[in-house]
Amino acid sequence: MERFTLLDAVAVPIALANIDTDQIIPARFLRKPRQEGLGQFLFHDLRFLDDGRERPDFVLNLAPYRAARILVADRNFGCGSSREYAVLALCHYGIRAVIAPSFGDIFFNNCFKNGLLPIVLAEAEAGALRAQIAARPGAQVAIELAAQSVTFPDGKSHAFAIDGFRKHCLFEGIDELEFTLGQAEAIADFEACQAAEMPWL
């Protein structure tokens, strides 16, 4: 996984509540291999017409937002079915962080396993951020993981909370398995000590 330290990037507003994982990536694309570019299927039915042409009014199809790496959503983002591909589609598209007042629980946990940072801000703060980036298309937002802060286009910083272990993994660019494998020497020492002290086990 790519390390997450400081992200200063274009942010895109999605002002729809309860966006579920089937809207993030429709079920018919779940047969695609994980290694393929799932980003092309992100918000597919919202981004494209039936004939494959882009919907001109969908926000990700607007020029200022095409390079967005931060998505600012409304409440309950990523609800619905347990679908890791929803997170992968965002990652493959280039999104590194999603800011919302709340998330679907499984989606929230899957984000950390794939190097995507989900940030919970109060509904008023998230709404204010969406309003700022809608008023200034192409405006940048800065996320500093070490300081746990989000700096809005107006220059004001807002704090966010994150579990310490998850913060460490994102900062190092590792997942839970890679973290565990990195403790191999300590695990071997523990097992050797335990075997010596409790040979009956």
Image (spheres, rainbow, N blue to C red):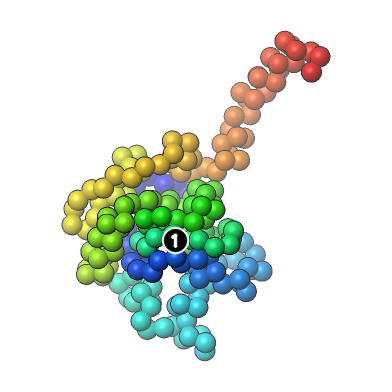
Q: Is residue 67 visible?
A: no
Q: Position of residue 24 (x, y in %)?
A: 50, 68
User: For the point 36% across and 81% down, which residue is it?
Assistant: 57
In the drawing, does residue 181 fall left or right of residue 65?
Answer: right
Report the residue at 46% width, 67% height from top: 19
Q: Residue furthest top?
A: 197
Residue 8 on image: x %, y %: 31, 54
Q: Residue at x 60, y 34 (%)?
A: 180
Which residue is labeled 1 in the image? 77
Q: Quadrant of the C terminus?
A: top right
Element type where label 1 sits in the image: loop
Q: Is residue 81 above or below residue 162?
A: below
Instruction: State the count of labels.
Output: 1
Q: Is residue 12 visible in this depiction of the protein?
A: yes
20 on left or right of 135: right
Q: Position of residue 145 (x, y in %)?
A: 36, 43
* Residue located 18% across and 57% down the image: 154
Where residue 60 sits: x, y (%)? 38, 73
Res. 64 image quadrant: bottom left
Q: Amino acid at mark 1?
A: Phe
* Residue 50 to residue 161: above or below: below
Tell which of 80 and 38 is nearer to you.
Answer: 80
The outermost residue toward the bottom is: 51
Locate residue 11 relative to residue 90 in the image: left or right. Answer: left
